[in-house]
Image (cartoon, helix red, strand yellow):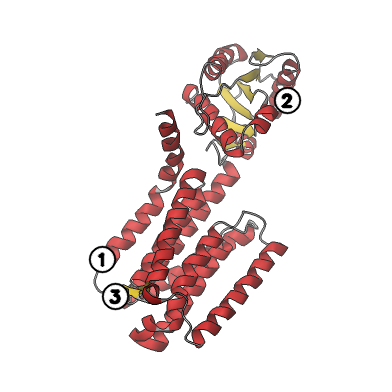
């Protein structure tokens, strides 16, 4: 039963991040099925919106120097251009064209590969190598298609709706793989890419319809654009793991703290030992559960994840004595809790240490208050842990 609740808790980040992309998918499906003939002017607007969202997403990625999901977006753009070109050149016969049949297989395969590319800087040798591989793959695709060689045989090359069965099968398998990864990982962008992947699949399934390709591809690029904005904001101002404000947010917001306040530090004890004894996913689960305990007891004042093992609470209009009682409640609650990890049979015990310092008239900024609190915490931890001190 405990393992069930732990696995259920792992799906919550996906549920939280999936609301907006799910709405975009639902609107695109309802719009496609409800409106038989979308006006030409609307189709042109959606066509323009597709390129605007593509360009805007790439600008964000180039500005922040991020790899993911540049290749994912680029292949969506490429497939959209190829599909429209094939429809223009071959009319309704494009579905039986080797170029289209092979593209139905190529797109889901590449999108799932690009989905799992690690996040790193954009301008690297690794990305240049990936780009060369993509060019080679496109050259192979053109060569196979021009010689009427199909990827897949017998029943798998036959069509289901407007997509060949092998392509549909790969889209379905890819959706399942991304769904499982996004559920476990809980990252914002991964959830958005899941829905974009599904929207591209619908674009291929109904590609013969004059509006389907534009509607679903525009929905996919809108989903990615919003996901990038959401993810970039969180990476800049939020801690991705716990959804708490991060160190940068603390620095920015510290100028708006009131004249009277106290800074409380809560530090996870023996973090290095935990880092060696648990896997990365298990340690992340422990940190998230510890953060949830802190939030459970402290809902009124801002909480920051300042470092990998360090949380900060700002008690506004309170001195160190009032804050001490609140931090002690948090410390005792965490020490008395049993944290359940999915793969471990026995619950895990965790302790934290705290220190509190209040602002003095001589303090020029909150940074000086924080330094005092950290020095006391470091000094205390040399002798003992699982304790709260004040200065």
- The residue under the point 51% across, 87% down is 146
Q: What element carries label 1?
A: helix
Question: Depth-wise, is mark 1 or mark 3 nearer the camera?
Answer: 1
Q: Position of residue 382 (x, y in %)?
A: 76, 17
- Is the N terminus in the top left, top right, bottom left or bottom right quadrant? top left
Q: Mark 2 points at which residue?
A: 371
Residue 365 appears in the picture as rendered = no
Q: Horizontal placement of 202 versus 121: left or right?
A: left
Residue 96 appears in the picture as rendered = yes
Residue furthest front in the image: 154
Label placed on residue 33 = 1
Q: Residue 175 is drawn in which quadrant?
A: bottom left
- The residue under the point 44% across, 64% down is 170
141 vs 182, nearest the viewer: 141
Q: Distance between the residues labelled 1 and 3?
A: 14 Å
- The residue under the point 68% across, 32% down is 276
Label placed on residue 39 = 3
- The residue under the point 23% across, 65% down is 34
25 vs 148, nearest the viewer: 148
Q: What element carries label 3?
A: loop
């Amino acid at each position: 039963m405990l393992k069930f609740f732990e696995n259920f808790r792992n799906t919550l980040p996906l549920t939280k991040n999936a609301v907006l992309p799910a709405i975009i998918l639902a609107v695109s499906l309802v719009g496609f099925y409800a409106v038989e003939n979308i006006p030409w002017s609307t189709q042109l607007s959606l066509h323009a919106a597709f390129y605007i969202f593509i360009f805007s997403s790439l600008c964000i990625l180039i500005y922040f120097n991020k790899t993911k999901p540049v290749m994912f977006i680029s292949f969506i753009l490429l497939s959209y251009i190829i599909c429209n070109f094939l429809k223009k050149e071959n009319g309704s016969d494009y579905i039986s064209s080797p170029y289209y049949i092979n593209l139905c297989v190529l797109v889901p395969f590449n999108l799932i590969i690009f989905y799992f590319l690690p996040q790193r800087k954009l301008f690297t040798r690794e990305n240049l190598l990936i780009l060369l591989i993509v060019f080679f793959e496109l050259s192979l695709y053109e060569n196979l298609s021009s010689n009427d060689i199909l990827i897949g045989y017998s029943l798998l090359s036959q069509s289901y709706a407007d997509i060949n069965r092998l392509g549909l099968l790969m889209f379905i398998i890819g959706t399942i793989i991304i769904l499982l990864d996004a559920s476990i990982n809980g990252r914002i962008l991964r959830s958005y890419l899941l829905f974009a992947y599904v929207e591209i699949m619908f674009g291929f399934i109904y590609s013969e319809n004059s509006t389907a390709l534009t509607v679903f591809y525009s929905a996919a690029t809108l989903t990615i654009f919003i996901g990038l904005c959401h993810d970039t904001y969180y990476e800049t101002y939020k801690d991705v793991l716990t959804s708490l404000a991060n160190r940068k947010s603390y620095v920015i917001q510290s100028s708006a703290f009131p004249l009277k306040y106290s800074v409380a530090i809560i530090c996870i004890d023996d973090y290095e030992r935990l880092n060696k004894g648990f896997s990365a996913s298990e340690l992340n689960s422990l940190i998230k559960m510890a953060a949830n305990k802190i939030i459970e007891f402290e809902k009124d004042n801002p909480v920051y994840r300042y470092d990998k093992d360090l949380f900060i609470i700002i008690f506004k209009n309170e001195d160190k004595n009032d804050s001490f009682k609140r931090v002690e409640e948090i410390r005792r609650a965490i020490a008395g809790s049993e944290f359940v990890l999915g793969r471990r049979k026995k619950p895990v015990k965790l302790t934290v240490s705290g220190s509190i310092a209040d602002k003095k008239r001589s303090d020029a900024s909150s940074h000086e208050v924080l330094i005092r609190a950290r020095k006391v915490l470091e000094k205390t931890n040399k002798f003992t842990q699982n304790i709260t001190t004040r200065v």
